[in-house]
Image: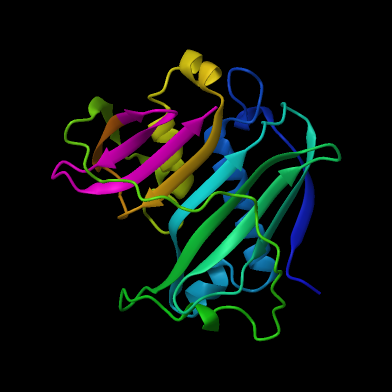
Amino acid sequence: MECIFEKETVIPLSLCDNCGRLSVHNVFTVFMDLAAEHAELIEVGADRLAQRGMFWLTVRTKVHINSRPLMMSRVQAETWPEAPGRIRCNRHYSLRDAEQVYAEGVTEWAVIDVNTGKLCKASDIYRADTVYSQRKAEVKPFEKISEDFESARYLGSHTVNSADIDLGQHMNNAAYVRAMMGFIPCRELEELDITDAEVVFRAPCYEGNELSVYRRDFDGGFDLGMLLPDGKAVCLARFTAK
């Protein structure tokens, strides 16, 4: 049987925006939580990897949004891993109901040895009897997002706080997206109708880090960058709208 995890879920109020729909940044949250649940079932969850001295590391993630489900609507969520490469592996996602596909996504992962800091061989992470699906999410290829925000517009700063920290003791992946998108006004988000969002993680951040947020516009969307005081980019994001 193919290694696909499916579950019916309800879109809760806590994940919705001012329009009563699943917010763009919480599409990433839903997919992240779904991946974590499936990973536990197939014995590659955080606890299992910790026993082996390993930790999941998100490299980059991208979602394509056709529409966003309304608050309290019932949806079918799916996720499945792609056959891994040597040191990286992809995981795919889908959010739909009987009538439409709301969103799809893909995340590129790696696994790090917590003692040496080196990347582990991804093909050794999953069980030998894992059957990988050939199916792939309908998401555009990853793009190259420039780290140069010198001439970009400064939006403000975000201090990493306890609400951002996860099990790895660093800033949670979804917290980066939430913090960055918090600088975009509700009115603009309503008018934009974002269809594609990509996030690239460059370096971990910890409680107390001060992050500057910059915006760089282009025809059809904008890039956001989170930078440390020394100018090092820790997270990059690209949002494309209709």
> Outermost residue, right direction?
98
| Residue 127 percent across, percent down from the top left | 64, 82
Position of residue 94 relative to residue 11, above or below, is below
- What residue sits 64% from the left and 74% below the top? 43
Can residue 163 be seen in the rendering of this structure? no
Residue in front for this viewpoint, 94 or 137:
137
Can residue 124 be seen in the rendering of this structure? yes
Which quarter of the image is occupied by the N terminus?
A: bottom right
> Outermost residue, bottom direction?
128
Residue in front for this viewpoint, 129 or 209:
129
Residue 87 is a magenta residue: no
> Outermost residue, left direction?
230
Point out the stretch of residues depicted in magenta. Answer: 216-242
Q: Quadrant of residue 13?
A: top right
- What residue sits 64% from the left and 47% below the top? 104
| Residue 156 percent across, percent down from the top left | 26, 26
> Outermost residue, front direction?
219
- What residue sits 58% from the left and 18% below the top? 18
- Check the image and tell me how it is coloured: rainbow
Which quarter of the image is occupied by the C terminus?
A: top right
- What residue sits 71% from the left and 84% below the top? 129
| Residue 37 percent across, percent down from the top left | 66, 58
